[in-house]
Image (cartoon, rainbow, N blue to C red):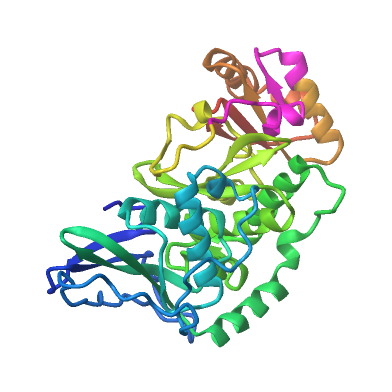
Amino acid sequence: MKKILNGLAIFLLCLGLGLGAVCVSSVLAPQSESLEPIRTVEEPGKEQSDIEEEPPVEEDPEEEGHTAEKSAEEPSADSLAYSLLDEETKTVYAQMLDTLENHAEETDLPTTDEEVLSRAFEALTSDHGEIFWVSGYQYVKESLGGQTVRIRFLPSYTMTQDEREDYQAQVDRALSPFLYGTGEDDSDYEKVKTIYENLSLNVKYNPDAVENQNILSVFLGGQSVCNGIAAAAQYLLSRLDVPCMIVYGDAGGESHAWNLVMIEGDPYLMDATWGNNVAAALGACSYEYLNLTNADLAATHTTDMDLELPVCVKTEFNYYVQEGLFFEAFEEDAAGAALRRCSEEGGRQLGLRFGSSEAYGQARQALVADSRIAEYCPDITSFRYMENENLHVLTLSW
């Protein structure tokens, strides 16, 4: 059994009283309180009778709450986590998604492998940040002669379908500030950057936020934690046709969630939550965690997923590279010119990124310790700065 992100999926094993059946629950992290009428649901596992005598009876495909075969349209190839799965797991993923979208009570899955079940659900939640009405799932495993012959999937819903539709309508009405500034003709980079900015400006990090493990906390409350923010980023970017998935793991010694996005066919990492926290300290958007490589986050972030994720190595669409604010070596004239342009255009803050610890140290010494920022921003009377030694980013505000 495996923990996923901040308790995102805490797997609890409950042995059934019958010798031939077990019930297992996977539960999303409990919410701190409830947006009425949403409820936190942690149902006990259902027990099944021993089925050593006869094979399981096939369910009628038309029976309410059951789906013998997947009827929904297969997920798009742009569903990033889905695209990383083998064919069996893709089929299970698709049937689970069909079950959740139709608010069905249960379904028999086309697998008898518990690991396939777990991996499919992890990929589904990674691809579908919009699913806010499910707290996790349970499954019933039936066996014959010591062999698993059927797995039944039972989602744990936190609301009725009518309540879900009401909340979805509220979310739809609340999206404008989060999609503000995006356009159909925008490049993938521009879309990702704008969504990152809007989440920074419109969401406050708050571990006590209501429904903080899903998008309701972001769009209806304006406060959330990493999982809610990463889910919102995935949801928004998918609406803009930018492939994006949630990545689960650990950062800074705690469970965490961030995103993997595809820009012009290449994967990049984005942590809107950490960017949000830096922005709160600066009082303005920080781009430190926009479009990074695996190497960039290696010192702070560790992935904990069953999926083999694409390796992010390209730097072309890193924010500082795109905006001409990356300097492989410290050249004071070049860095100073960037500061001067920002100041002349009315800017009050600028981040500079350097290609090595040595270059970063030289910039810090010249611009901060020796206060030579004043030579390039002559009207300033004071300034402050923020350091990110891991990423070699020096942010100056005046």
Give the main secondary structure of the magenta stretch.
loop
Q: Is residue 154 magenta?
A: no
Q: Residue at x 87, y 48 (%)?
A: 185
- Quarter of the C terminus within the rendering: top right
In the rendered structure, the answer to whether residue 161 lies left or right of residue 118 reads: right
Q: Residue at x 39, y 44 (%)?
A: 306
Relative to 321, does residue 41 appear above or below in the rendering? below
Locate residue 62, reporting x and y percent: 50, 82
Q: Nearer the viewer, residue 42 or 48?
A: 48
Q: Nearer the viewer, residue 360 or 216?
A: 216
Locate residue 151, reporting x and y percent: 33, 65
Locate residue 75, reporting x and y percent: 61, 56
Q: Which region is colored magenta?
A: 311-335
Q: Nearer the viewer, residue 266 or 272?
A: 266
Locate residue 216, reporting x and y percent: 56, 71
Q: Among all residues in the image, which is located at the extreme front?
A: 54
How many badges with numbers are in the image? 0
In the rendered structure, the answer to whether residue 344 lies left or right of residue 253 reads: right
Say if residue 281 shows up in the picture.
Answer: no
Q: Nearer the viewer, residue 241 or 355?
A: 241
In the rendered structure, the answer to whether residue 72 lies left or right of residue 256 reads: right
Relative to 368, does residue 113 appear above or below in the rendering? below
Location of residue 344 by image quarter: top right
Q: Residue at x 48, y 44 (%)?
A: 86
Q: Residue at x 40, y 71 (%)?
A: 31
Relative to 312, does residue 125 appear above or below in the rendering? below
Q: Is residue 329 magenta?
A: yes
Say if residue 128 shows up in the picture.
Answer: yes
